[in-house]
Image: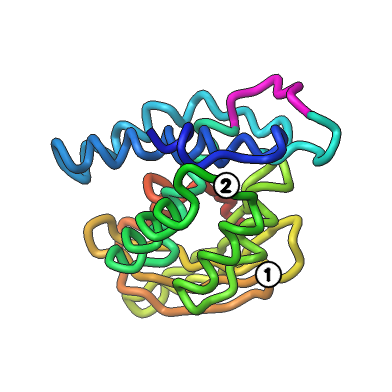
């Protein structure tokens, strides 16, 4: 049981207990049934997310005034999102096992996990965690679409609280998504003409289409 093995020193970081434990339920569904069933399982919990407060509370004050369950469900969705942003299940599952083995029957904090992710992926996900853990709202993918010469011209960027936020995301035709790497600056790409959508079943984000 993850939450009682990898523990914490500060109640404000309770997400390390509860987000992982909730997410492990989805991984059990994936193992016992299928990936598609795990995605549906997570989707059934999405409506419980409030985005009222940051997932991490104020440190060093014995904080326990949560008021929401975001450190369960939103935290699990953050991990689901991170998996698909990394887009390499070999790295992802090795990362989870290695983090657990490193801190089993011990304590870890948020920075320990951020450092672990950065080390395992050889990419800096600090801005990702700042946005998801320390701000109430998820990032918003803003985009514009134009159909031209049988192509879809997509302009896109992240709107976020964290200035240097960047994260890959999947867009386009479901079943044949295209991976893009938005930042907070506008970018443009030509895609095959399709029934365009953003893969919100794989990423906990807001989406805003602009004219």
* Image side of residue 80 versus residue 114, left or right: left
Mark 1–mark 2 Cα distance, whole angstroms, equals 14 Å
User: Where is residue 138 shown, x and y percent of the image?
Assistant: 62, 47
Q: Which residue is drawn at the image coordinates 75% and 56% (left, top)?
A: 161
Q: Crowding near pointer 2: few (<14 within 10 Å), some, many (20+)? A: some
Magenta residues, start to end: 63-70
Reading the image, the residue beneath label 2 is: 206
Q: Is residue 65 magenta?
A: yes
Query: Which residue of the protein is positioned furthest toward the left in this rendering?
Result: 33
User: Where is residue 88 shown, x and y percent of the image?
Assistant: 32, 68
State which quarter of the image contains the N terminus: top left
User: Where is residue 21 shown, x and y percent of the image?
Assistant: 43, 35
Q: Which residue is drawn at the image coordinates 59% and 51% (left, top)?
A: 208
State which quarter of the image contains the C terminus: bottom right
Q: Considering only vertical position in the picture, is 95 above or below 183?
A: above
Reading the image, the residue beneath label 1 is: 184
Q: Considering only vertical position in the picture, is 86 above or below 31?
A: below
């Amino acid at each position: 049981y993850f939450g009682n093995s990898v523990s914490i020193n500060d109640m404000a970081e309770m997400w390390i207990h509860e987000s992982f434990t909730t997410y492990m339920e989805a991984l059990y569904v994936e193992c016992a049934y299928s990936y598609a069933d795990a995605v549906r399982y997570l989707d059934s919990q999405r409506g419980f997310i409030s985005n009222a407060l940051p997932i991490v509370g104020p440190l060093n004050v014995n904080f326990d005034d949560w008021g929401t369950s975001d450190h369960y469900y939103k935290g699990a969705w953050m991990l689901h999102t991170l998996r698909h942003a990394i887009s390499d299940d070999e790295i992802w599952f090795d990362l989870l096992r290695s983090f657990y083995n490193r801190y089993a029957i011990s304590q870890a904090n948020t920075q320990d996990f951020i450092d672990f992710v950065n080390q395992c992926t050889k990419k800096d996900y600090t801005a990702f965690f700042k946005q998801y853990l320390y701000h109430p709202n998820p990032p918003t993918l803003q985009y514009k679409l134009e159909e031209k010469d049988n192509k879809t011209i997509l302009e896109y960027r992240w709107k976020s609280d964290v200035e240097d936020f960047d994260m890959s995301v999947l867009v386009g035709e479901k079943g044949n998504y295209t991976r893009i790497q938005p930042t907070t600056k506008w970018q443009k790409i030509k895609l095959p003409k399709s029934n365009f959508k953003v893969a919100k079943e794989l990423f906990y984000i807001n989406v805003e289409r602009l004219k």
